[in-house]
Image (tube, coloured by chain):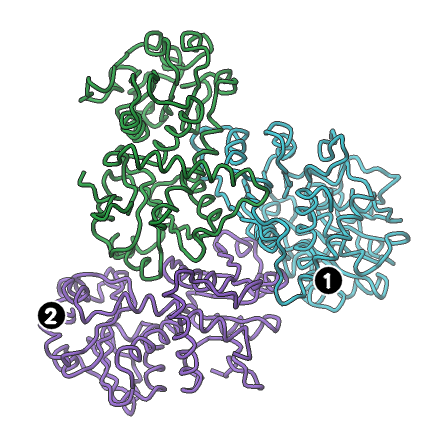
Chain colours: A cyan, B purple, C green
Amino acid sequence: MSNIQITKKDNFQHLLSIEGMNKELIIKIFDIAETFLKIGKNDVKKVPLLRGKTVCNLFFENSTRTRTTFEIAAKRLSADVLNLDISSSSQSKGESIIDTINNLIAMSGNIFVIRHPESGMPEYIASNVNKDVHIINAGDGNNSHPTQGLLDAFTIRKYKKDFDGLKIAIIGDIKHSRVARSEMHALSILGVSEIRLVGPKIFMPDDIDQNKFMEFNDMESGISDVDVVMMLRIQKERMQQEIIPSEENYFESFGLTTELMKLAKKNAIVMHPGPINRGVEIQTEVADSAQSVILAQVTFGIAIRMAVMTMLIDKNI
Amino acid sequence: MSNIQITKKDNFQHLLSIEGMNKELIIKIFDIAETFLKIGKNDVKKVPLLRGKTVCNLFFENSTRTRTTFEIAAKRLSADVLNLDISSSSQSKGESIIDTINNLIAMSGNIFVIRHPESGMPEYIASNVNKDVHIINAGDGNNSHPTQGLLDAFTIRKYKKDFDGLKIAIIGDIKHSRVARSEMHALSILGVSEIRLVGPKIFMPDDIDQNKFMEFNDMESGISDVDVVMMLRIQKERMQQEIIPSEENYFESFGLTTELMKLAKKNAIVMHPGPINRGVEIQTEVADSAQSVILAQVTFGIAIRMAVMTMLIDKNI
Amino acid sequence: MSNIQITKKDNFQHLLSIEGMNKELIIKIFDIAETFLKIGKNDVKKVPLLRGKTVCNLFFENSTRTRTTFEIAAKRLSADVLNLDISSSSQSKGESIIDTINNLIAMSGNIFVIRHPESGMPEYIASNVNKDVHIINAGDGNNSHPTQGLLDAFTIRKYKKDFDGLKIAIIGDIKHSRVARSEMHALSILGVSEIRLVGPKIFMPDDIDQNKFMEFNDMESGISDVDVVMMLRIQKERMQQEIIPSEENYFESFGLTTELMKLAKKNAIVMHPGPINRGVEIQTEVADSAQSVILAQVTFGIAIRMAVMTMLIDKNI
């Protein structure tokens, strides 16, 4: 993609994908997120950094969970939040998406958090709307989910300090996962030594860059000696299409169990973007174990989203 | 129920049902609600007691009215409010309700207001989620609706001062009403002298404690000489099941009329949890009469909910 | 209509329609809106004028766009905003609309923004609910849409300074448009010299007051020499009823094109209440031209709604 995320003056204008970000920018986001994590422990969790600004959540695909994290992050920054139910709005009256957003800009929307089933839609919008507005991609098709990729990498930094020397396994339907795609870009940029893609052949991307990633089609070897296990959610919709024979069958071959975790490093952590399917891609005992940092990811996700919104609005931070 | 509402250190942790509360706690809620009623008369009605806290409304059963009262109460305390549309969220993706709530806790939800069609669900949730979070039951099955029970008893105190010596009639489908159940517990604990349950046989609970409650199957004797008339809403859904022959028929036998009100004490008050069905369980003239305190109940309901939320969060109040 | 908008003490109590307002009141709204436009340019756009007040959006007809403008205006005034989804609320339980609103008043709603498919419903509500509450009509049937009429007239003042001497064309389905009706009243009261109604015969109102309005059934003569072109949205629903043969057909006869704009005054402005149908009632080139002030209307609409709400609440402004 053309890098319209960063302006010619080197300002952070949009967050569309991890691709096109450099290590320095990602580390800066993490450092600012750290300060917001501290605020999250205060009794009063609000800061006035976005007071008087309006954040519009435009979700063309249903996701209460992700929308809620952006809403909480924005409110904690004292922004006004608009949740727009797009399916029941002007779209049905035949207005183009660019006209809809230009209208919201005219009402003084400052940040637009967009989830859309079509890959590339947030970038299309960022390229076509009036200037001086910020687009955050909250997931587009199977292309990208950059705040998830950032919060996942941030979680790893919290538990492992350095990316250098780490062995990390991403496990599941990598081919169709925007989360996996964003994680892969983030971990590459941050210099992780060994990034493994683990899953059945049908779940592997067609064009794996062998210089960056290693493919494994069985769990035992894929998980062996890793520092971090990043599970992906199995989308039940895909099972109904009979791509996966059954939940039990998948769990038997690629479900994460306490047995398998014994092959990983002793202090390995287990991650999952949620919502988890207990007994499908992950055993209940693993999800609830001391190695699981799944709920910590959620907490960190608020801080990452606060950091991104603040940096988009405030050039001097 | 085991009393998980109150911690071993005697802290008020959850509000799940009136059962298990003692008179002292209820009176304290009322006294704090009084102070919020005064604030409600100010020009600026906001206080910063819950600033930086997040209240999540989780309604698995539709109720704009009740949800709105909690939303207003929380906003008046300066809390951030999240209304989560559960039907369209992770539940449909197969996530367990406890996982959903643990996720929201990880996002820093502090108070969860839960309405659920299954009896006991709020208690189940309170027993299973991570600590340091507060559950308020906003109605579960036909089990309990404690804030309604509290606001009703508070309304009686506002108009009658003392509970001692009062005769109170609860009228309608007591058997299936969570509101009636919470009212009965509240009035018992507060020491009301005579609590009457009035309605057709099919609407009477199976196991009435004769030491606490008196059963009446006709309006004339049930309402005679009472200080307070507490009507229940007739649920039209039940009529469609032909349990009640017709609206007209029910109104003729158990509808509250100005004629019937002449049998009550002269200064008796009329209450109803709303929404009222004019001409079904209550005559329009009675609903709009000087004796009706139905809209006052709504106003008091905001103050009661503010008091409960404040006490849950602030142990030192 | 009886003028219940203005109390006997000359206070501005409700905004139900432009009819019944005088020039002085409209100009005062415009002058106050000007001050809010300036605030809109500040970095922090909030003012505390409605702090502690509650604005309830009651939309019985779907309109994300209009509801959002009221929500933004209210939040910028620091009010608490409740968006009530009426279709799923007490209405379905058989409660009357007046009971619903009296309940919301008891919860301390101060301003009720109401959109309803039936003409006259906001006035009916204003006449029947408890006192000391303010109703704003956000569109009722094909009767009135006063804030749109006000913001349109305000937009003209911004670009043309004086109403005196102006020639203005309102173009489209005037007969069924509440927007046209409110524009016609506003421009008449403000003393516009020549107000033209342009469209096919079937779109002309039955009873045009010839002293105030001129009818044109072709675009060339209708648009000739005007200062302002006010387009109306073609409602596709009506096309399906075969009142208009087809979109292409309508565009050929009454679509606004760059060719036609050459007949208007050189500095004429183009307005549209949105959402626009590109290629149906307006050519893309015209919508995006320098003469188009369509997005400015949206910005001004926030300021107008802030002015109206502030004036309803604060008698001394």
Looking at the image, which residue is at 44% across and 83% down? B25
| Label 2 to label 1: alpha-carbon separation | 64 Å
The part of the image, by quadrant, that contains residue C251 is top left
**Which of A20/C221 is in front?**
C221
Residue A131 as seen in the image, left or right of residue A266: left
Same chain check for tags 2 and 1? no
Q: How many marks?
A: 2
**Which of B283/A9 is in front?**
A9
Residue A252 as seen in the image, left or right of residue B32: right
Looking at the image, which residue is at 44% across and 47% down? C74
* Disc 2: which residue: B258
**Which of C219/B131 is in front?**
C219
Q: Position of residue C22 (x, y in %)?
A: 26, 34
Kindly tell me whether residue A114 is visible in this rendering.
Answer: no
Mark 1 belongs to which subunit?
A
Q: Label 2 crowding class (10 Å Cα cut-off): few <14, some 14-19, many 20+?
A: some
Residue A42 as seen in the image, left or right of residue B147: right
Q: Label 1 crowding class (10 Å Cα cut-off): few <14, some 14-19, many 20+?
A: some
What residue occupies the far bottom of the structure in this picture?
Answer: B211
The part of the image, by quadrant, that contains residue A13 is top right
* Disc 1: which residue: A293
Depicted B228 relative to depicted B24: above or below: above
Q: Secondary structure at mark 1?
A: loop
Q: Name the front one of labels 2 and 1.
A: 2
Q: In the rendered structure, find residue B6 and report the number of the disc placed on it.
A: none
Mark 2 belongs to which subunit?
B
Q: Position of residue A206 (x, y in %)?
A: 77, 35
Depicted A116 relative to depicted C233: above or below: below
The residue type indicated by label 2 comes to Thr
Depicted A146 relative to depicted B77: above or below: above
Looking at the image, which residue is at 19% across and 65% down? B287
Q: Secondary structure at mark 2?
A: helix
